Image (cartoon, coloured by chain):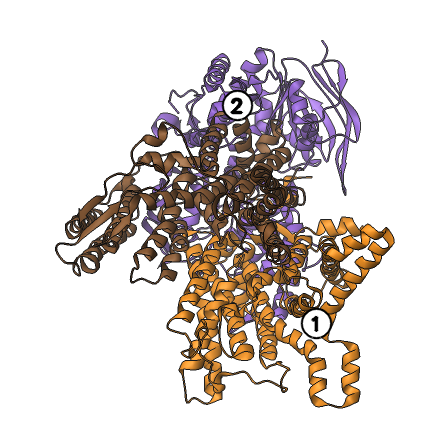
Chain colours: A brown, B purple, C orange
Amino acid sequence: MATIALQPRYKLVSPTRQRVLGIIYLALAFLLWFAFIRPLTADAVTTFGMTPGGLGVRELAPWQLPTRTTILLMAAVTAVVGGVQLVRGFGRWSTLVLGLVVGVFVFGFLIWSAAGRSLNLAGLLRATLSAAVPITLGALSGVLCERAGVVNIAIEGMMLAAAMMACLVGSITHNLWIGLLGGILTGALMAAVLAVLSIKYMTNQIISGTVINIFATGMTSFVSSKFLQTNQALNDPGVFRTFPIPGLVDIPLVGPIFFHNNMFVYGMFVLLFVLQFALFSTRWGLRLRSVGEHPKAADTLGINVFRTRYMAVILGGLVAGFAGSYFTLGSVGRFDEVMTAGRGFIGLAAMIFGNWTPFGSFGAGLLFGFANSLAAGIAILGSSIPSEFLLMAPYVATILVLAGVVGRGQMPAADGTPYEKE
Amino acid sequence: MTPVLELRNITKRFPGVLANDHISLTLEPGEIHALLGENGAGKTTLMNILYGLYSPDEGEIVVRGEPVRITSPTDAISRGIGMVHQHFMLIPVFTVTENVMLGEETVRFGDVLDRKAAGRRVRQISEQYGLQVEPEVRVEDLPVGVQQRVEIIKLLYRAADILILDEPTAVLTPQEADELFKIMRTLAQQGKSIIFITHKLREVLEVADRITVIRRGAVVGETRPAEADKNKLAEMMVGRHVNLEVDKEAAKTGPPVLTVENLVVFDERKQVAVDQVSFEVRAGEILGVAGVQGNGQTELVQALTGLRPARGGRITLAGTDITQASPRQITELGVAHVPEDRQRDGLVLSYPVIDNLVLQTYYQPPFSRGVVLQGRAMQENATRLIEEFDIRTPSEETTAGSLSGGNQQKVIVAREFSRPIHLLIASQPTRGLDVGSIEYIHDRIIQKRSGGTGVLLVSPELDEVMQLSDRIAVMYRGRFVAVLDATQVSKEYIGLLMAGVTPEQAGTPTAPRKTVEVTL
Amino acid sequence: MTEETKPKLDAGKVLTQELVGEGKGAPRGGGRQVAQAVIVPLLAVVTALLIGALIIILTTESVYAAFRASIGSGLVESLRVVGEAYGALFAGAFGDPAKIAAAISSGDAQAIRRAVNPFFESLVAATPYIYGGLAVALGFRGGLFNIGVEGQLFVGALCATFVGYALTGLPTIVHLPLTILAGALGGAIWGFVPGYLKAKTGAHEVINTIMMNYIAFRLSDWLLSGPMKRAESFNPVSPWIQDSAKLPRFFDSPIRFHAGFFLALIVAGLVWWFLFRTRWGFDLRTVGANPHAARYAGMSIVLWTVMAMGISGALAGMAGSNEVIGVNYNMAMSFSSGYGFDSIALALLGNSHPVGVVLSALLFGALRNGATRMQVVAGIPIDIISILQALILMFIAAPAIIRSIYRLRAAGKGEQVVSLRSWGE
């Protein structure tokens, strides 16, 4: 097995990568100066509104920044960091520094875009959280399945089908909760099909996932064209209202953003904590992970690999169903064809980025959500950049993340391999 | 005294193969009983039946006087039967405690894991039997010998008292094997009964109380070490007089074909796997590299064949510098490579034999003219090689995946040996093969040597290395600890070097120290 | 039985699946293997159609009304509804035999053309499928799952459109090949990016190609509403391409059958020759079948991963440009009816082999063409095609389901292995 470790006498990070990153940082600093600072007048002021939205919510005083000085400061910091990176590198902190630089650059971009005007920063953060919900929930669904060793690229399809069903059932029964139940069960049903194909028939899991996706797209569009478009009453379930958590909602800035939401957001938080604990501190979690790492070993210890995988996938389906219901019952209140727009796949990327852990997935979800909201926010400001490009932001972000800007983490060792009992 | 375990007339058939033919065997309490047989004799099948992974077609199993039917590993464990498999059933990213308690977890408040309590028990077992294992370490960070002991703890944790060890010394140095034997004796003294599966004669004579020999699925004899000797046992295993020595004349060496200077190679985790290694291989000689798997041999061979970059040093092949050469360039310069993992690296299992036979040469004439493949030339080549190398296959169109291990290896050998070559690199060329195939491949390698090819043989099987090599290098932790003349060295000496004992402490090659005090 | 007889599954690194496949060219194993390769796909299609019929029955009001009257009338109504739907499907795909006969006897050229049009229109619809199916199939052969065909064909179409309208004054013999080349190049670049990322960083191509799809859609949105917008229109649509960039048609309107069909067949032949008769194809397939052995054999994994995605993208780009230069003569956002995703089912139905792909493409073209009429005449939304596809795909991926439904014998040792990798590699 492993070679016995010796003192590493040779460098850990490839020198090329270090230099390339250093040059990139310097280039970013230059860009900050060239594109953002130079065209500005000296007295431009950027105002960041701090109104998170919601009734009766305390507003904070807007945050005003002298545009030029602030961006100059950021450019200077980036340049210094770039210099250090070029010469020495940051060793173990490289990834963190990369994240910080990107953050600084994006913030500088924001400041520049809002120069002389006002941008509702709190609103932006709030939108980020909203956008992060389906992505994070999708990622959680993925975590459940993949930790047990089943690749699930059908999250998109499950979410779409659940969205439609939740809308349809909610409209017919005039009851949001039954609609939600319908959505969740739909997710579980599609997951069951995926499970049977992948576990019992041992098909290639990416293909069985694609089957579900194509089926869901076809089925939802079919039903939508035939029934939902023609009969508006079937497409009007209503929306879950937001409600505050008393006490916590009064915390300045953070309060209104985190604690004045609808039940989907709260549900996401609950799931986050529950799953993180369950996966890593309970017997259930240990067994589930063992099946995903080394199913043969688990089998010899008496753990039923097939049953565990079925359970994990169906649970993942329940979560995906919950996620899908968010699109209709938690957001716009009606079903549009293919309304998930790839967020199931972004959720998968968030899962990989988050190293197959719930908390990591949430962090990644926030990141992608931010990319999404940023695009919308900038578009509102009437930036010179066409909106279509901004809309590309989350997808480009996904590609960059997957390209190993952050490294590849530790996936469950038996992920994707059908288990064959001899 | 009633036997703690009895197998009566166990028979198991698979399509086309009678794996176990009315096998009967008894195990006394506190006994170490060795099950000896060559690869494919049916030993593992028998043990899988005992462990609940298969069910027998005929026969019965009697545990402590009671006939039982064992339906699954859990069932076996509940009857006190535990098995340590040849390929470890450990989860690398989990800690020792997590691995041991999986399936039998200690919990608090319902389902919450109680790692501390489990850890305490692991430590207690470790101390009771002298196993020296730290509970909170991740298994992937442990050396192989220690991982094996974790497997043993798994069984003891579950109160197994019949332990089955399947080829446990396959991955251990002779010294680590001796450690294991000591542990086995401790276990036996404390009342555990052990079945020990192996094909290694020496070990059987050293540690077993009784030996049962299995050949072609049936018991061919039972004996005790005091009454048996190696040659007789080998004969029982194979059924005919086996030449344990290989016929070879003295080496007629020529100029060096391969020169390696100060080679440095990293492994996947960016750690040094090959640490400033220097050696040369001359035409017409076999240089064997002995060492327990995991000491850098794999990375060394990969660097020599262009599959892994060299981070330092130089490799020269018959005058050409190949340090940074690509695999194809190296092949074209006249190097043949029989890889360690034949199914992963040496063959495309889904391709027919025809395609596999030209895997190294398909892009050159006569198999390609310009860009276009020449099917007929490939066909003729296949027909010729199948006959010349005695490859048993229904047709040349059969996919390589359908062939037996021995024939798969013959395909690779046929492919590699049928080109003009200066250097042959053979990595574990006889792993998992039956005796007939082993003999065949050894003969072919000697033939190449007589023909003037230089051979680098890398193998963890010390017997193989000693039989074939003219000179022997011992690799430990990435370094060549010594390079010795094969005719003037004893196995025990090499064993010491393989375990990390320095040459000074080990004594002289012909008279190694018997007891060596070292921290391993 | 030693452990050696079973091919080892390298945990986490290789996804393997048994698909019925062929090693090279025509199967030599005799009739049995051909039969195996044909029966399961055939039954898959038939079964899918049966399930489709069930869906139609379940979603038609009049059936429920008839059942409320009586079981008998319910069954009759069900059959009528399915008959009407599939009848429309057939007529839409091949033409109404009655109409054709009438038209021929009347002797009116226009009427004949109108009557025979559905058949030719199916061929027109099949052409982009041939390219798309080849694209996905070639990807599979290289061990890659190219779900990005849709995006690649958009980009290919954009490039072909631009070259088609922007370059003036060129003779057809120059302009047309240039346009085709532009389309292929555009798709190739779009496929190259995820291929390169996969080769160099290991990022899985499934997610990356899907992301590239969305980026391509936004890009097209922007271009067609902005720099590439036709001046005189309010809609996001491109200018008409020059006559010199159009693929010739064989008949007068309404028949749109164009030379692109034959070009596609030629390309299919080239792909077959490339994959099975050249050493480059051998490289690509080996990298897909076993990258470890490929490295050992001296092949460059990076090169062939990138090439596989690049060539695949080029084929997809040709699908897009085909629609522009052969059918529509311009580009609008709605020009593709989801060819990219259909191609996945297509490639698998065709065993990732050019011959199978062409046959499957003809089938899908007929289905898609027929479904348009089915939507108009019987009110069945065209999305039912996606549902049928998903079912076909499922039956192909899990042939055991078909076998157990129809009580077929299990296939013999001839089954091959096509590998796709999980996230880790």
Residue found 57% across the figure and 51% down from its top: A235
Tag 1 subunit? C
Quick check: can you spot residue C85? yes
* Above-or-below relation of A267 to C319: above
Percent position of residue C155, x then y: 45, 68
Total tally of numbered discs in the picture: 2
Q: List the single residue furthest toward the right.
A: C72
Disc 2 marks which residue? B100
Residue C122 versus residue B284 in the image, above or below: below
| Residue A238 spot, x, y in % from top left | 53, 44
| Of C409 and B108, the residue lying toward us | B108
For this rendering, which residue is in front, B26 or C65?
C65
Number of the label disc, if any, that sits on residue C125: none
- Label 2 lies in what chain? B
For the question of whether residue A413 can be seen, the reply is no
Q: For the residues marked 2 and 1, what is the alpha-carbon distance in whole angstroms?
A: 64 Å
Pointers 2 and 1 in contact (C-beta within 8 Å): no
Hey, which residue is sitting farthest left in the picture? A42
Q: Is residue C120 above or below residue C6?
A: below
Within-10-Å neighbours for mark 2: few <14, some 14–19, many 20+: many
The foreground one among C394 and B306 is C394
The residue where tag 1 is placed is C93
